[in-house]
Image (cartoon, coloured by chain):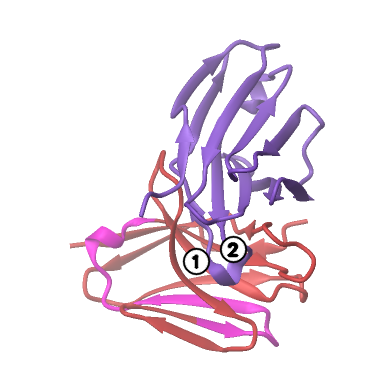
Amino acid sequence: DQQVKQNSPSLSVQEGRISILNCDYTNSMFDYFLWYKKYPAEGPTFLISISSIKDKNEDGRFTVFLNKSAKHLSLHIVPSQPGDSAVYFCAAETSGTSYGKLTFGQGTILTVHP
Amino acid sequence: KAGVTQTPRYLIKTRGQQVTLSCSPISGHRSVSWYQQTPGQGLQFLFEYFSETQRNKGNFPGRFSGRQFSNSRSEMNVSTLELGDSALYLCASSFDRAAYGYTFGSGTRLTVV
């Protein structure tokens, strides 16, 4: 049972345009969501997070949107840069009962073309 | 500020052997979580330790175990290695939970032959 899903295995965008990565979840108990970027043979690097009490969080070029009723979150990268090319994972936690346990999506490979 | 340090970076073991991986968290972080990444299963949670106590455990067989020391450093052990245990093993440290952020180490690449 995959509780966090990233249905797009890959996404290709042009430099300077917007990248939108999507993530759906099924567990309504998740109350904290995170996005990570990962290069091969390295650990994930934290990008941005959002609590379930918010619907939007911004940090520079990165914005995360949370739609609790649809159990959907998205990561917007504007403008996209070639250095953003990596695998992006969304992750979720139920802080009240599952401290320390992140449930990850399968990842989306983002390629930004110059 | 030093990051999360995992040792060794690479390891090759034979089926049936056991292996111990080490993780040193960021100073002040009391939570250490372990994950297994494989191409087929993605990133899967193994277990989490907080102040030397296991708070959470994922769906892995008992061959996978871990512990945390008083200085928050953690080790995970895999006994009776199987070919399917070949993976990138990642640890993440946090002050407590997601709201405080999880920082990952670079991982240990385990190859079982």
- Mark 2 residue element: strand
Asked if B17 appears above or below A108 in the picture, the reply is above
Quarter of the image with the N terminus of chain A is bottom right
The local crowd at label 1, few if under 14, some if 14 to 19, many if 20 or more residues have their Cα within 10 Å, is many
Identify which residue is drawn at 66% across, 12% down: B15
- On whether residue A70 falls in the magenta region, the answer is yes
Residue for badge 1: A35
- Label 2: which residue? A91
Tell me, yes or no, whether the highlighted magenta stretch contains residue A58: no
Question: Whole-percent x and y of residue B32?
Answer: 61, 49
In the displayed structure, does residue A67 sit left or right of residue A42? right
SS under mark 1: strand
Chain B as rendered: colour: purple
- Looking at the rendered image, the quarter that the C terminus of chain A falls into is bottom left
Left or right: A40 as drawn, with respect to B95: left
Give the chain letter at badge 2.
Answer: A
Amino acid type shown at disc 1: Trp
What label sits on residue B41 in the rendered view?
none
- Residue A102 in picture, x, y percent from top left: 64, 59
Q: Which residues are magenta?
A: A65-86
Query: What's the CA distance linking mark 2 and mark 1?
Result: 6 Å
Q: Nearer the viewer, residue A68 or B53?
A: B53
Question: Is A80 left or right of A68, judged from the image as shown?
Answer: left
Chain A pictured colour = red
For the point 62% across and 34% down, the residue is B75
- Labels 2 and 1 touching (C-beta < 8 A): yes
Tell me the quarter of the picture where residue B82 sits: top right
Residue closest to the eye, B22 or B82 = B22
